[in-house]
Image (tube, grey):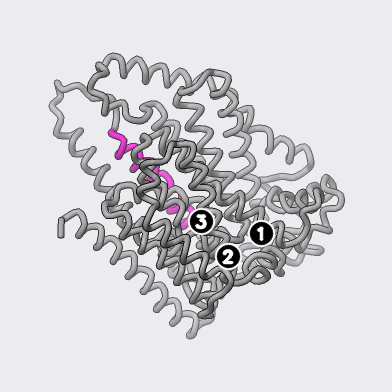
Amino acid sequence: MTRPLLRDLCAAAAAALLVLAAVLVGRHIQLAHHTLFVHWPPLFADWDPHVGPGTSAAVLVAVAMVAYGPLLAVRLPWRALLATAWGTAMAWTWSLALVDGWHQGVAIRLTTTNEYLRVIDRFHDIPATLRDFTHHIVAGSPAPWPAHIAGHPPAATLTFVLLDRVGLRGGGWAGAWCITVGATACVAVLVTVRVLAGERLARRAAPFLVLAPAAVWVGASADGYFAAVAAWSVALLALAVTGRAGFGLRGTAAFGSGLLFGLTCYLSYGLTLFALIAAGVLLLGRGGPGRPESPQRPRSACTRSDARTGRHAARVLPFLLAGLAVVPLLFTLAGFDWWEAYRLLVTRYYQGVGGTRPYGYWVWANLACTVLIVGLATAAGLQRAGRALVRERADVRARPVTAPAGDGPAAEVRLALLVCCALLALLVADLSGMSKAETERIWLPFAMWLLPACAFLTHPRVWLTAQAVLALLLNHLLLTGW
């Protein structure tokens, strides 16, 4: 066994032990003190071994992806790969959702007590409801909003209100919307990785983005939809700042990125942390993919190109800011105060189970939930990403003072930096204490950006098998709450 593979296995084993510790310690805390408010810690789920209509399809998709996914990811034309990734991610997510049956797995997920569809009738006058929204956040106020509506800005609920208005009524359509849109998140991540770190790494990451255990919660929770909106805001930003198209297209991409990031902030308060990932994209966009790996290009040419890229970023900044202003401006003019709503949400959070759940357990058990949504392969990939950054730092220190500084980090280092930005955002969310439990769905938007770390792995079929087995076990042994 080679040393890199041994390190991969050690990282995966450490992640598995973290999950085991979270299960054992969590069961003890829940049985002794009843303060976790989850039935199968650390997940919001119940032990319920079962099979269902989607079982055969889920196994078939998993076997096909393990057998042919890595090969197709290398051979398919790029646009065909993106379409195939979306289609396969939808097949994987739908089949996992249907393991619980149409009614339990899709149709009622967004209609339960705390979910968005419960309050659609209160939005018959949308402007008036937005003006009055903050008056119903705190528990004890007149007609307080259910937990999820109070815990999110109104764009989340408005999405399902507008679906209802156009005739797509009920939990079935809402679930289908979340799965269909949520499955596009893997495409957005692929586009970003290709632009920032090159096509080779994007292709290597593709099967892992498609066959992610996170699909268990994408189908069907609104957080899968949030993940896609946030992911496309990052993808459009990457396209805008790397200068690979005409100025008009770059400006359009920048405006779209700002528009979607503004929407992201009005879908979930916590997703403002995507600003950390966006900052990473702005930093990495200056280098562009593959430049240091082109010995035919003289350093002076690379420097001139990077300077042009910096000017591209500066030129599209007004478009980005203009797009970013649209959604906040519309909601503010409609009478919704984001900052006041967030202040009241913090009060509501500590009025409920968030004030009882022990921070000392969840601050690390949340990370165990993350292992379950990204899989052991991602734990091994993150270890390799960390080593890539350490090697780059060591190379910089060892370089003689008189040696040229080089043209920027290698493709692997750029991918590692992108992944680390997502990990940083997730850790900030964790330390905030505003995400105690249920992070298997709440952190779906961040988890999608950890999965590209799997591009560093060797033996992809073995790791894909581990990912598929984990997802199938989770979906067939547990009845998840979302």
Could you tell me residue 187's position as x and y percent? 50, 43
- Tell me the kind of residue under disc 1: Gly
- Quarter holding the N terminus is bottom left
**With 200 as the anchor, is 116 left or right in this view?**
right
Residue 291 falls in image quadrant? top left
Could you tell me residue 350's position as x and y percent? 61, 65
- Tell me the kind of residue under disc 3: Trp
Name the residue beneath numbered marker 2: 97
Residues under numbered marks 2 and 1 in contact, where contact means CB atoms less than 8 Å apart: yes
Q: Nearer the viewer, residue 144 or 459?
A: 459
Could you tell me residue 368's position as x and y percent? 41, 65
Does the image show residue 478? yes
Check if residue 418 falls in the magenta segment. Answer: yes
Local packing at callout 3 (Cα closer than 10 Å; few below 14, some 14-19, many 20+) is: many
The disc, 2 or 1, on the residue closer to the chain's N-terminal end is 2
Does the image show residue 269? no
Name the residue beneath numbered marker 3: 443
Structural distance between the alpha carbons of marks 2 and 3: 19 Å
Q: Which mark is residue 245?
A: none
Q: Nearer the viewer, residue 44 or 55?
A: 55
The disc, 1 or 3, on the residue closer to the chain's N-terminal end is 1
User: In the rendered image of this protein, does residue 257 appear above or below residue 353?
Assistant: above
Structural distance between the alpha carbons of marks 2 and 1: 10 Å
Q: Main secondary structure of the magenta part?
A: helix
Magenta extent: 410-432
Could you tell me residue 385's position as x and y percent? 30, 47
Name the residue beneath numbered marker 1: 175
What SS does tag 1 mark?
A: helix
Residues under numbered marks 1 and 3 in contact, where contact means CB atoms less than 8 Å apart: no
Image depth: mark 2 or mark 3 in front: 2
